Amino acid sequence: MISGPRHFAALAARLQWDPDAIDLASDVEPWHRLEPGLRRRLTILLAGFCVAEHHVADELGPFEPAAPDPGMAAVFGAQRADERRHARLFDRIAALFLSAPGRDARSRRRFVRGLAPAPVLDLFEQRLVRAAWALADDPSRLAEGVSLYHLVLEGVVLTAGQQALLAELGDDRLPHLRHGIELVERDERWHVGFGLRCMLDLCPEPETIATLLREGELAVDAWGATVPAAIRSRVAAQHRRRLAAFGLLPAGEAHVAAGPAG
C-alpha cells in the first residue's frame, strides 16, 4: 500500500529547493552554440512547461477545500507551493533561454505559448481549467480532478516531457538547466504518488477510471514528435501499469498492452 498524507507532507518539507539559486545564466552561452535542431526541440519542450507549470500552480486552488480530511488538504497545499516554485523556474528559463520579452511573468508566458504544441495548450489552458472550475462548484468531483491533474497531466504529459528533456540534456552541455529539470521531476514523482493515494482513498466510480485510462493513453501524444516514440510508448505503458498496481483497472485489463504511440 502507498503511504498516507503524513508521509507526503514530510516528503514535501524535506525536498525544498530555491529556483533562483540555480545558476542558469552559466548555460546561456552554450545554449546558443547548440545544434539548431536540438535547440528547436528543447525550445518546444521548455515553452510547453512554461505554460503548463503556470496553470498547474493556479488551478490546484480548488483541490485543498475539496479534500475530505485535513491531512489530504495539507498535502494539496504543499504541492501548490511546489508548483509555484516550478513556475518560477520556468519563467526564468523563458527569459534566459527562450528570449521571452516582457517585464513580468504574464507577458513572458504570452510569448512562449506561441512556441508550445497546441495539444499541450489545450490540455492545460482548457481541459485543466474546466476541471478546476467544476471542482470549485462541486467538491464531490475531487476524484475526477485528481485523475486528470495528477495522473494524466503530471503522470503522463509532464512525465513524457521531462524524460525527453533529460534525454536531450544528457550530454551535460547545459548542466544547470538539467539540474533544474531533475529537481522538478523529483517533485512530480511524489505528486503522482500522492495522486494514487488520493484515488485509493476516494474510491472513484468505474467511469472515472475508464476516462483516466483513455485520457492518459491519448495525452501521451500531446508533445507530438518532439517526444520520441520510444518515450511515449514507455510512458503510456507505465500509466497502465501504475493503475493496475494499485487495483484501479477493471479486472482483465491490467495486462492489456498499451496501444503504440504514433
Image (cartoon, rainbow, N blue to C red):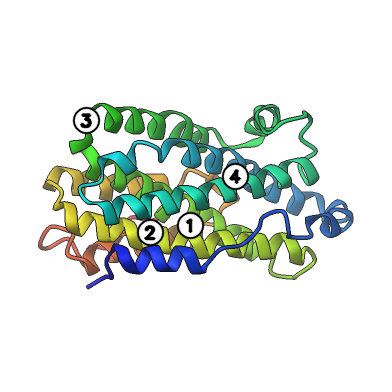
Q: Which residue is mark 4?
A: 87
Inter-mark Cα distance, 2 to 1: 10 Å
In this view, the mark in front (2 or 3): 3
Q: Label 1 crowding class (10 Å Cα cut-off): few <14, some 14-19, many 20+?
A: many
Element marked by disc 3: loop
Does residue 220 show up? no
The amino acid type of the residue labelled 2 equals Val
Q: Which residue is mark 3?
A: 138
The answer to which of marks 1 and 3 sits earlier in the sequence is 3
Inter-mark Cα distance, 4 to 1: 16 Å
In this view, the mark in front (4 or 2): 4
Q: Is residue 146 above or below residue 18?
A: above
Inter-mark Cα distance, 4 to 2: 18 Å
Near-viewer residue (119 or 257): 119
Label 4 close to label 1 by CB (< 8 Å): no
The amino acid type of the residue labelled 1 equals Thr
